Image (tube, helix red, strand yellow):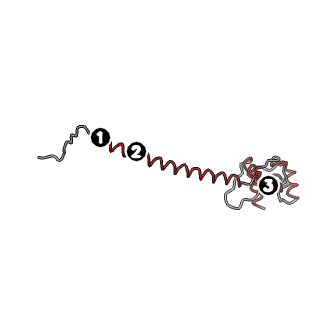
Amino acid sequence: MKLGYYLVVDFGQEWIGGSRKSLLLRMRRRFVRRLGRRRVLWRREEAAAQTKKEKAANLYDTFDMRVDRHWSEKKLEEMTERDWRIFREDFNISYKGSKILRSMRSWMESKLSPELLRAVERAGYKTPSPIQMAAIPLDL
């Protein structure tokens, strides 16, 4: 019975793992060259993304970022989106859905009738609880 294996003995050619050393070096150089090209392209893409982020940051409206006073000291008309966001975070108020109503900050800002406001005052409620701040405007 004859086996299909041949032993190649090529003295002087420096074989490594069944391949010539010169072939392996050529393949390695080609790989390094391609890797370098990919890195250049990746850096260009990263630089383009960074400039896009910087442009977006420059276009951001800084009016909403000004902090003159705490939200509790401002009138209802002076409240910005940032103030409302901080207010909701302070009281852990969150909504689901797309139409988000403004929460009430105090009993006087609520649109309750004067009789109800007097009843709330007689009951001894100084400030509404977070659930009342969120739920009463939804009901009105």
Where residue 4 sits: x, y (%)? 17, 47
Q: CA distance from mark 2 to mark 1?
A: 18 Å
> What is the three-letter code of the residue carrying label 3?
Met
> What is the three-letter code of the residue carrying label 1?
Gly
Q: Nearer the viewer, residue 109 or 67?
A: 67
Is 50 placed left or right of 112 in the picture? Answer: left
- The residue depicted at 61 percent of the width and 50 percent of the height is 50
The residue that label 2 is drawn on is: 29
Work out which quarter of the rendered image holds the C terminus and state it: bottom right
> What is the three-letter code of the residue carrying label 2?
Arg
Where residue 40 sits: x, y (%)? 51, 49
Mark 3 and mark 2 lie on one chain; the one further toward the N terminus is: 2
Position of 38 relative to 101 (above/below): above
The residue that label 3 is drawn on is: 104
Where residue 106 sits: x, y (%)? 82, 52
- The residue depicted at 86 percent of the width and 54 percent of the height is 108
* Between marks 3 and 2 in the image, the one whose residue lies nearer the viewer: 2
The numbered mark at residue 119 is: none
- The residue depicted at 15 percent of the width and 46 percent of the height is 3
Is 23 placed left or right of 132 in the picture? Answer: left
* Between marks 2 and 1 in the image, the one whose residue lies nearer the viewer: 2
The crowd level at tag 1 (other Cα within 10 Å; few <14, some 14-19, many 20+) is few
Q: Which residue occupies the extreme left position in the image? A: 1
Q: Which element carries disc 1, helix, strand or loop?
A: loop
Mark 2 and mark 1 lie on one chain; the one further toward the N terminus is: 1
Mark 3 and mark 1 lie on one chain; the one further toward the N terminus is: 1
Position of 139 relative to 40 (above/below): below
Q: Which element carries disc 2, helix, strand or loop?
A: helix
Q: Which element carries disc 3, helix, strand or loop?
A: loop
Q: CA distance from mark 3 to mark 1?
A: 77 Å
The residue that label 1 is drawn on is: 17
Q: CA distance from mark 3 to mark 2?
A: 69 Å
